[in-house]
Amino acid sequence: MSKPLIVLPRPGTVPPSGATQPIPAPLEAAFVATFGNRLPPASYLQTLHGKAAYYELPPSSPVSTDGKQPISRVLFVHGVQTPAIGLQPLANALSSRFPSAHCVLVDLWGHGLSETPFVAHDPALFHGLIEAVMVHLGWTDAHFIGYSFGGSTTASFAAAHPERVASMALVAPAGLRRTAGLDEVQKGYLRGGEGLEEAARDWILEVLEGGRLVVPSDWKERVGRGEVVAEAVRDWEMKEHAGHAASVVGIFRDGGVFDKHAATTGIKSRCVLGELDDLCSVQDLHELGMQDVVVVPQVGHGVVRERVPEVAGFIEEFWNRLQQ
């Protein structure tokens, strides 16, 4: 039996009465039983819109007092579909290189162990979650690492709240796909409406996946070896998180993935891009005013998981410059 189709409100519309409760997320025990203890135990934050999960890698050594500006607070913002666990290998790599840093990964709405609020999934919703996490942690600012949609969310959050962002490293930032490239049927899927929602969901999921989702047959063995198999995580979310697909569609439509131009904020930033990325190019980033762009050769949009040492090295180089 298929799950009922959930369609979230759009910006500027009023949710139907009685339908404003958030859609619950799966239990942590179910996630750990499937994917192991790659992440630290989840902490939860209750907000106006729902309950969100985050994960802390505490500092393993005291903050240096050698006169440098230390990297002490780092917030990781993941992309659409794959939740915080997708950034765990990079977070571990950077935590070991910057042992005085307090690293926090958050599951965005409708992902991982965070609920799906029954409201429009516009940029302000995600900015509010980031702000709530920072207030909860007592952080005045942080160094941000945003991947894919999390990169465009970080950039737009920085434009709205520049005092909160000490620096930003944007890995394969998405937000550059423009509506001009869509045909009328696809534009109809973006608008949505009666009779379109099921086809729209299927089209959006295929666009994001680059085709049908195919989970590798050896994913359990790979997870057992400590790998993050993103396809298996996405498949699990589709099956176990009742609000996940609705959140993905909502983000794709209203979360700022289309026609997003990062504002020039003066915040120190670096972009790390896979050479074969089909969502974003060096030229795109330069046109948006991002001058510090480094490229990892022979890898596509999955660079953040597939080439962790190189990505961590580029961010380490960037942060070392900031500390001088």
Image (tube, rainbow, N blue to C red):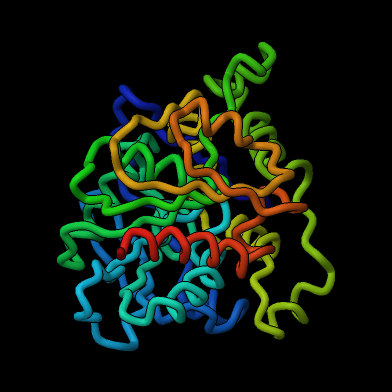
Left/right of residue 10 with respect to residue 39 in the rendered view: left
Position of the C terminus by quadrant:
bottom left
Left/right of residue 68 with respect to residue 261 in the rendered view: left
Kindly indicate the quadrant of the structure image that contains residue 202: top right
Looking at this view, name the residue that lies furthest to the right. 217
Please indicate, yes or no, whether residue 24 appears anywhere in the rendered image: no
Left/right of residue 226 with respect to residue 322 in the rendered view: right
Q: Which x, y percent locates residue 160?
A: 24, 36
The image shows residue 188, relative to residue 80, as above or below, that is above
Give the residue at x 57% y 22%.
178
The image shows residue 69, relative to residue 124, as above or below, that is below
Left/right of residue 187 with respect to residue 210 in the rendered view: left
Q: State how many labels appear.
A: 0
Please indicate, yes or no, whether residue 191 appears anywhere in the rendered image: yes
Q: Which x, y percent locates residue 87?
A: 52, 65
Give the residue at x 53% y 33%.
285
Give the residue at x 51% y 34%.
175
Q: Which x, y percent locates residue 11?
A: 35, 26
